Amino acid sequence: MSIDFLKRVGLFVAFVLAQALVLGRIHLFHCATPLLYVYFITLFPRNYPKWGVLTWAFVMGLTIDIFTNTPGLAAASLTAVAAIQPYFYALFIPRDAAETLEPSLINLGPTKYSYYVVTLVTIYCLLFFTLEMFNFDNLLEWTMSVGGSILITLALIFTFEIAKRRV
């Protein structure tokens, strides 16, 4: 087994446990929930196979669904984000960059990394809460859930990135 695979398994377990035991129980103002496990999908390097990213995303989404009792929501949303992740990543890195370049605040710079992460988290939250509500009868609740979850998730992701930068 490679070190990269073991590192990904460790991150997988950490994100699933954090979401299932702590973050999944937080509902700020009864609408905003931190969905930190999306960060796992943003960490894949440039040269990682697309089928690998999709597999990791589906298994993580399914595991989150099992622990949080959301049948298929996280799996569908995370797999959709994983399907578009390589294309968004290609938009923000130069073509002559190293093949093993991992997206981070240090590697991409604050502006490009912010666009990359904000776009993927926004798409994920839109998909997740649209599938969860499955209608727009209560548009205000949907908007508050999407907006609040985007903000709190991004705050956590940037906190981790800044902490990683200082270590």
Image: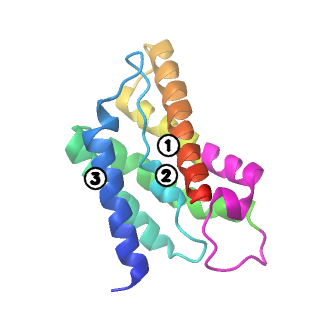
Q: State the SS at label 3.
A: helix
Q: Which amino acid type is shown beneath numbered disc 1?
A: Tyr
Residue 68 part of the magenta segment? no
Colour convention of the picture:
rainbow
Vertical order, 151 against 3 (above or below): above
Marker disc for residue 132: none
Of residues 133 and 38, the one nearer the viewer is: 38
Picture quadrant where residue 119 is located: top right
**Cα separation between marks 1 and 2:** 11 Å
Residue hosting label 3: 62
Image coords of residue 63 (percent x, y): 26, 53
Image coords of residue 154 (percent x, y): 56, 39
Q: Which amino acid type is shown beneath numbered disc 3?
A: Leu
Q: Which amino acid type is shown beneath numbered disc 2?
A: Tyr
Residue hosting label 2: 39
Q: Closer to the camera: disc 1 or disc 2?
A: 2
Residue hosting label 1: 124
Residue drawn at x 73%, y 51% as measured from the top left: 110
* Stretch of the chain drawn in magenta: 94-119
Q: State the SS at label 2.
A: helix
Q: Earlier in the sequence, mark 1 or mark 2?
A: 2
Picture quadrant where residue 99 is located: bottom right
- Indicate the quadrant containing the C terminus: top left, top right, bottom left or bottom right: bottom right
Q: Residues within 10 Å of mark 3 (few under 14, many from 20)?
A: many
Residue drawn at x 66%, y 52% as measured from the top left: 116
Asked whether the beta carbons under mark 1 and mark 2 sit within 8 Å of each other, the answer is: no
Of residues 121 and 103, the one nearer the viewer is: 103
